[in-house]
Amino acid sequence: MIENSQTVNVVWLRRDIRLEDNKAIEMASKDGNPILLVYIFDDGLVKNKSIYDPGLNFVYQQLKKLNETLGKQGSSVLITAGNPVTVFKGILQKFNVKAIFANKEYEPYTISRDRKVDELCTNNHVRFELFKDHVIFEPNEVLKVDGTPYQVFTSYKNKWLQQLDLTQLEAGSAASNFYQFKAEMPSLDDLGITACDFEVKDFTLDHINEFGSTRDFPGMDTGSFLGPHLRHGTISIRKIVLSVINTDPVFLSALIWREFFIQILYHFPYVIDGSFKKKYDFIKWENDEAKFKKWQEGKTGYPMVDAGMRELNATGYMHNRVRMVAASFLCKHLLIDWRWGEAYFASKLCDYEFAANNGNWQWVAGSGCDAAPYFRVFNPMTQHKKFDSKSEYVIKWVPEYGTLAYGQPIIDHDFARKRVLEAYKNAVK
């Protein structure tokens, strides 16, 4: 029996935790009924809420801020955890729902999940509508002339820029007709989430004009810190693109890489657990668990690798240049399966996004879309000297660096390089 007789439109927040420039909210508002906002910590995406996960904590913090804003309007977000189909069965029994609005997601699991929710809605005579929101172009919107997906980034980027229409990026009208509903904010314990003692920086575009010249130097601390905010939608991608389109082309390219990897995952879902270039599935990995643990803890004896891993463990963030160095070290120096590193980053990164994480790890491993051959092996000492010459970044995270307390390298660079080249050569011949 429906407990609340007033007709409402539900907006299911997913990776769009904001009220402004949110397509699902905009369209629900135009439909005329009061809007009930719902957020579900989806069991299908949250594999283990009991682990130390900065990303989940970030989402919780943003929902708390959203509730503070909505509270001034006599409303709140209905926050819960579980299987979305089960959750919506309960919502449809409690509220008189006319339609459920949400913004599209493009990963295999989320597509399957949305089909099940759509089926539930159809059986209950409720509309289920999805909208493009967290990308500029959907996976099927930037294609080759023959209708097939791009597999090379440069070609994809050129077509993406060619199709870009800035007039389509302007924000729509903001909603104000939120359902007068006060739900108590569940605690992290209520949701089964382990609390993390950390703080995510607010994003900034102050250094965008110099992004191309400073982005590789972790000690300069000139990053935008946009990652988690873009991943979870506290700001719209449209607003970001409009902000940077005439400033730094390198930053814009980074945003296009994000959409490139999203369409790769969409069109080639086998990359979830396999190499994009399938011949790389035959690499014989060493997978030394003791060395993997040293890598996780930032105790490899390679300063930039260790600094990056310690930064990740402490903050849920790692500078982009250092991510490449640390990831390359795991795959190429330690000859450990890139999937191990992908999973570890997924559990630690506050800005974790499956498509980007998978795509970047495969790029480093040489098994992905990148045209560079497998014998690209970053030298972590050269990277340290080139991008942190005064060791400002390293000393911040590895204070014992330069003293006898700092450990020796767990593997010799020349030996590791020779070994990995032989392993790859044998696998792909």
Image (cartoon, rainbow, N blue to C red):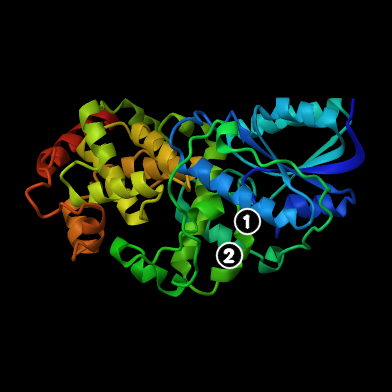
User: Residue 240 location in percent, x, y?
Assistant: 58, 64
User: Residue 288 location in percent, x, y?
Assistant: 22, 27
For marks 2 and 1, give the CA distance.
9 Å
* Residue 388 or residue 66, whichever sits in front: 66
* Residue type, mark 1 in image: Ile
| Earlier-in-chain disc, 2 versus 1 | 1
The label shown at residue 136 is 1
Res 191 quadrant in image: top right
Q: Secondary structure at mark 2?
A: helix
Asked if residue 361 is positioned above or below residue 145 in the image, the reply reads: above
- Identify the residue at image location x=37%, y=32%: 339
Q: Secondary structure at mark 1?
A: loop
- Identify the residue at image location x=35%, y=30%: 279
Q: Are marks 2 and 1 in contact (CB under 8 Å)?
A: yes
User: Residue 373 location in percent, x, y?
Assistant: 29, 45
* Residue type, mark 2 in image: Val
- Identify the residue at image location x=48%, y=48%: 351
The label shown at residue 282 is none
In the shown orientation, is residue 150 left or right of residue 293?
Answer: right
In the shown orientation, is residue 243 left or right of residue 326?
Answer: right
Res 51 quadrant in image: top left
Which quarter of the image is occupied by the N terminus? top right
Q: Can residue 288 be seen in this snapshot?
A: no
Residue identifier under label 2: 241
- Identify the residue at image location x=54%, y=45%: 262
User: Residue 54 location in percent, x, y?
Assistant: 46, 43
Query: In the displayed image of the protein, which residue is found farthest to the left?
Result: 404
- Crowd tier of the residue under label 1, counting other residues whose Cα lies within 10 Å: few below 14, some 14–19, many 20 or above: many
In the shown orientation, is residue 313 left or right of residue 137?
Answer: left
